[in-house]
Amino acid sequence: MSPSAHRSIAGDDGVSFPPLVSVILPTYNWSTVLRHSIRTVLWQSFADFELLVVGDACDDDTEDVVAGFREPRVRWHNLERNSGNQAAPNNAGLAMARGKYVAYAHQDDLWMPEHLSVLVRALEEDERTAAHTLILDVGPPPDRIRRVVGLPGGGTFGADKVELFTPAVMHRTDAARRIGGWADWRGLREGPYFDFLNRLIGSDRDLVSVRELTVVKFHAGLRPNSYVDRRSDEQAEYVERILSEPDFRARELLHAMEDGARGRRLQALVHWSSDSPPGAYMEQHRTVRGLPPLPSTIARRERSLREAVLRPARKLRDVLPGRLRRPLGRALSRAGSFVVRDAER
């Protein structure tokens, strides 16, 4: 069956109503790079889609940039309050989505022209929940270490697991709604995309793997102050290379193979720990990117700090003789007045 064979209404341009695919693109105040991402969505060989650009309370010129494409398939929606992560914009996109399938674009990543077509074909020929392609993960200059993401055993999840990022994934819209969409990052010890994909897919048996490289990723978490500098030169260069170099993929895959053979690895700037409090992992990401902490997370961070300091203080208070407790309280007060009040209770 062809990708659009079951659609009831189709125009001359190949776009149905409702469209077969809803592309969700979360964004926040980085319009210079967003231009390139939108461009690579609109150049898709598969045209039966809507593009939902969802701002996380953007207050720059992002809306004007989106409108400047003058493309009827593009819809703009801006959240009233900044949530600090892609999860809330993605949920807004899921609520707006009219397509049978959902794909995710990222504001600082690029799609190859056949990205949507190969994923639609995979899900139309298979009854599983989701499908994914391969990602070229490009490290920051000057080294630009490359790696390929999406191969079993190619990441940090074990030999039988597949490391995924959402720009490479397409899933059935109703499946995402059944699990309640994306969880708030402030309640998670891991990244929201890990949580979402684990709940959505459940096991690799419910995932179609397409062995085609269709995504180029420029991980913001590997580029300090990326949301402050708001550079877009890497994306601009790669867009032109995709358009002008017939052997672009072969060259980049060769670079990735050479980097792997030489033991060159991308150095993570954010580290996950099962002992970290909820939200801490993504707070690290925000810090690396140059984003300030949200007011709600500042209060939570202060509580965590307070508990970490008071824990040893309470233990010392319990074992020390009474005559030493008040000197202990005075000593602790030098580290912060809030400690001494609890130490004297």
Image (cartoon, rainbow, N blue to C red):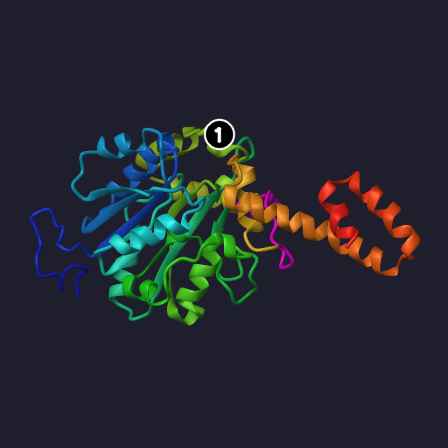
Is 214 on the left or on the right of 161, as rendered? Answer: left
Give the quadrant of residue 201: bottom left
* Quarter of the C terminus within the rendering: bottom right
Residue 45 percent across, percent down from the top left: 22, 47
Q: Reply above or below: 235 against 330.
A: above
**What amino acid is found at the position of numbered circle 1 in the picture?**
Val
- Tag 1 residue: 228
Write the residue at 28% across / 65% down.
Answer: 174
Q: Judging from the image, what secondary structure is the residue with disc 1 in?
A: helix
Q: Which of 341 and 240 is in front in this view?
A: 341
Is 244 on the left or on the right of 183, as rendered? Answer: left
Q: Can residue 150 be seen in this view?
A: no
Give the quadrant of residue 276: bottom right
Q: Which of 155 and 254 is in front in this view?
A: 155
* Residue 223 is covered by the magenta coloring: no
Is 179 on the left or on the right of 328, as rendered? Answer: left
Q: What stretch is highlighted in magenta?
A: 257-276
